[in-house]
Amino acid sequence: MSEMLKRRTIVEDQLAELENKIVAVCMRCSHSRFVTGRFECTVKRSHCHSKRVRRWLDEIKRLEDSND
C-alpha cells in the first residue's frame, strides 16, 4: 500500500471518529435536529455551548484541509 493511501485511510478514520463523537454530544442537545442522515445545529458554530464540539469541528476542518 502506498504511503499516500495509508495517510488517507488514517485521516478518514480520524474524521469518522471525530464525527461520531460530535453526534454523540449533539444527539442530546436541544439545538440540533436530524436532517437527511446527519445532525444540523440551529446555532452558529461559534455559539455552540460545547467547547469539545467546537474543538472537534476545528480538528475536522484542519484534517480536511491537510488531506486535500
Image: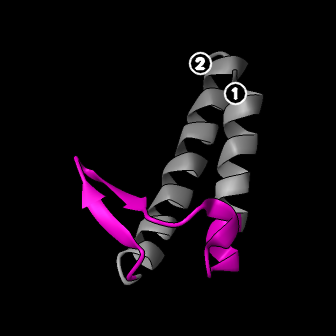
Residue drawn at 65 percent across, 48 percent down: 60
Location of residue 61 in the rendering, given as x and y in whole percent from the top left corner: 69, 43
Q: Is residue 17 left or right of residue 65?
A: left
Location of residue 58 in the rendering, given as x and y in whole percent from the top left corner: 73, 54
**Badge 1: residue crowd in 10 Å (few <14, some 14–19, many ≥20):** few
Residue drawn at 61 percent across, 70 percent down: 53
The residue tagged with tag 2: helix, strand or loop?
Answer: loop
Residue 1 picture quarter: top right
Q: Is residue 47 above or below residue 17?
A: below
Query: In this figure, which residue is indicated by the disc labeled 2?
Result: 1
Residue drawn at 67 percent across, 75 percent down: 52
Residue type, numbered disc 1 = Asn
Q: Is residue 62 left or right of residue 48?
A: right
Residue 65 picture quarter: top right
Q: Which residues are magenta?
A: 30-54
Residue 1 lies in the magenta-colored region? no
Location of residue 25 in the rendering, given as x and y in whole percent from the top left corner: 47, 78
**Badge 2: residue crowd in 10 Å (few <14, some 14–19, many ≥20):** few
Residue drawn at 56 percent across, 47 percent down: 15
Mark pair 1, 2: CA separation: 17 Å
Between disc 1 and disc 2, the foreground one is 1
The residue tagged with tag 1: helix, strand or loop?
Answer: helix
Residue type, numbered disc 2 = Met
Q: Is residue 13 left or right of residue 64?
A: left
Quadrant, the C terminus: top right
Query: In this figure, which residue is indicated by the disc labeled 1?
Result: 67
The total of numbered circles placed on residues is 2
Residue 64 picture quarter: top right
